[in-house]
Image: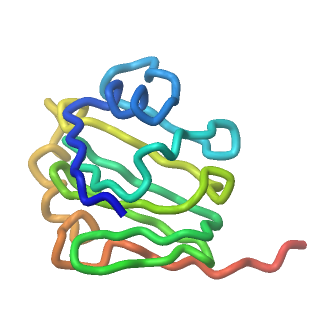
Amino acid sequence: MNSETLSFDNITDLMLRLGLPAPLHPLIMLVNYDEERMSMADAGKWFDLGFYKISFKESFSGSVQYGPGQYDFKNGGLAFLAPRQTVMMSGAPEDHTGYALFFHSELLQRHSLSQTIHRYGFFAMQSLKLCSCQKRKKE
């Protein structure tokens, strides 16, 4: 795998690099992996994001390298990334389901959340950011 780090300060540049459409608003984007297929040309590279990312994955057959650990999403899960945290993803685009919400910290300006978001442990590098999901029985 390639250990190159790609740095993105805005959501538009990341989306274009992944072969996805540019966001309708430059500070926020929701990607539905069931409708959008991203390019995997950069699989194995580290991504340094200058914005927040919250992912909900129903299933994923690959793994995610995050900080010092490697995590799998075989049962689905949630992942939380704060600006300037790095993540390396491997896998094929057809393995992805679920959603990813990208938002820039500028979106929170003039809101009290901009002063307190750093207190939430799920965005802190020291804590486990991945929450495993169990399959629910469908009725």
Which residue is located at x 37 percent, y 31 percent?
A: 28
Residue at x 35%, y 34% (from the top left corner): 14
Q: In the image shown, does 109 or 30 lie closer to the viewer?
A: 30
Q: Which quadrant is home to the N terminus? A: bottom left
- Residue furthest out toward the top: 24
The correct choice, above or below, for 60 with respect to 131 in the image is above
Which residue reaches farthest front? 1
Number of numbered discs on residues: 0
Front residue of 79/136: it is 79
In the depicted structure, whether residue 71 falls above or below residue 64: below
19 left or right of 42 in image: right
Q: Is residue 82 above or below residue 70?
A: above
Which residue is rendered at x = 18% and y = 31% of the image?
106
- Residue 36 occupies which quadrant of the picture? top right
- Expressed as whole percent of the image width and height from the top left, the position of residue 117 reads 18, 54
The reply, left or right, for residue 1 in relation to residue 111 is right
Q: Is residue 31 left or right of residue 29?
A: right
The one nearer the camera, 7 or 134, is 7
How far across and down, in percent of the image, does residue 22 sit? Answer: 45, 21
Q: Is residue 117 left or right of residue 36?
A: left
Indicate the quadrant where residue 45 lies.
Answer: bottom left
Q: Residue at x 60, y 56 (%)?
A: 92
